[in-house]
Image (cartoon, grey):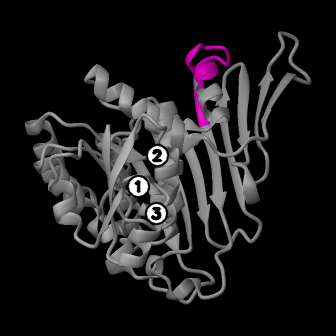
Amino acid sequence: MRVAIIGCGLIGQKRAKAIPPKGQVVICADLLRERAEALARTIPDAQATTDWQSAVQREDVDLAIVSATHDVLAKITFAAVEAGKHVLVEKPAALCAEELAPVIARAEKNRVRVKVGFNHRFHPALLKAKEIADSGSIGPLMFIRGRYGHGGRIGYEKEWRANPAISGGGELIDQGIHLIDLSRWFLGDFTWVHGVARTYFWNMQVDDNAFIHLQTPSHQIAWLHASWTEWKNLFSFEIFGQTGKLHIEGLGGSYGTERLSWYQMLPQMGPPETTIWEYPFPDESFRREWEDFLLAIDQKRDPSGNIYDARAALQIVERVYRGSR
């Protein structure tokens, strides 16, 4: 699979490292030439350019990885699928759900696959939790409680994420969209959406905290909080079934060791039977996501965390923003 990387910042670099040797990055594109050249130097035979349009048009490119700012994600993805390329685009994939309509139409017409960077689905603790939940081992699922956040950094209010014209929103569309996607992955579509997005601390035009209440048609609930005022980085995702609970904590690094706890209710109730898995390894979610995408292309199926999932998650984000206004 011959690859063009569009956007050579931190995430573009991570995506490049996740491609195994059998994949070939042929071109690195970034508006900052020095950044494109810096990444290209780490990849044998890769070229560098500031012209992303020509990069996605190249005949020797099969797939584009798009890791730019939110305001151009849909534009670049559309150009790539129009050129007949498969695309892995970073979340949220667009500023709003409406931007994805022409992308979806063209991808379907050209029979190419679009994967969205919902890499949290590919963390080992979450993969194991999904396996347990799908097996019925914790009974019918009742509700989810999720929290995700960090504290920003000095000058955070001056970064592009604080500019709504570029970002489309704040913490809700940033980390909150991961919580929404994971909740949909476990519970399915939500037909009832309520929430508020507020700015409490950072001097910016976008939200630094979002509180979300979602319900499925069968009244399963996801109760979510995403925060840029967490101060101590946190990831906590709890899945409650009628006979047990799954709790995923940490994502490695500053979020702490990734851990899955399975609390299985006993017939006599009382203290549960507890099983704990820990994953003290480097983050392999980008590599696993890449492998799943290639398999989906080979099998001619939609990948896990696809453009339809992104559209559904963005629709929820927009409903919360409208309600908050």
Q: Nearer the viewer, mark 3 or mark 1?
A: 3
- Magenta-colored span: 131-143
User: Mark 1 or 2 closer to N-term?
Assistant: 1
User: Mark 3 or 1 closer to N-term?
Assistant: 3
Instruction: Indicate the secondary structure of the residue bearing disc 3.
Output: loop
* Residue 78 in view in this figure: no
Task: Give how far apart the Cα atoms at labels 3 and 1 are.
Answer: 26 Å
Q: Nearer the viewer, residue 100 or 279?
A: 279
Residue of label 2 = 118
Residue 319 in the image: x percent, y percent? 35, 59
Which numbered marker is on residue 91? 1
Residue of label 3 = 41
Please say if 273 is above or below 218.
above
> Crowding near pointer 1: few (<14 within 10 Å), some, many (20+)?
many
Q: Is residue 134 magenta?
A: yes
> Crowding near pointer 2: few (<14 within 10 Å), some, many (20+)?
many
Instruction: Indicate the secondary structure of the residue bearing disc 1.
Output: loop
Task: Give how far apart the Cα atoms at labels 3 and 2 are.
Answer: 28 Å
Check if mark 1's residue and mark 2's residue have beta carbons within 8 Å: yes
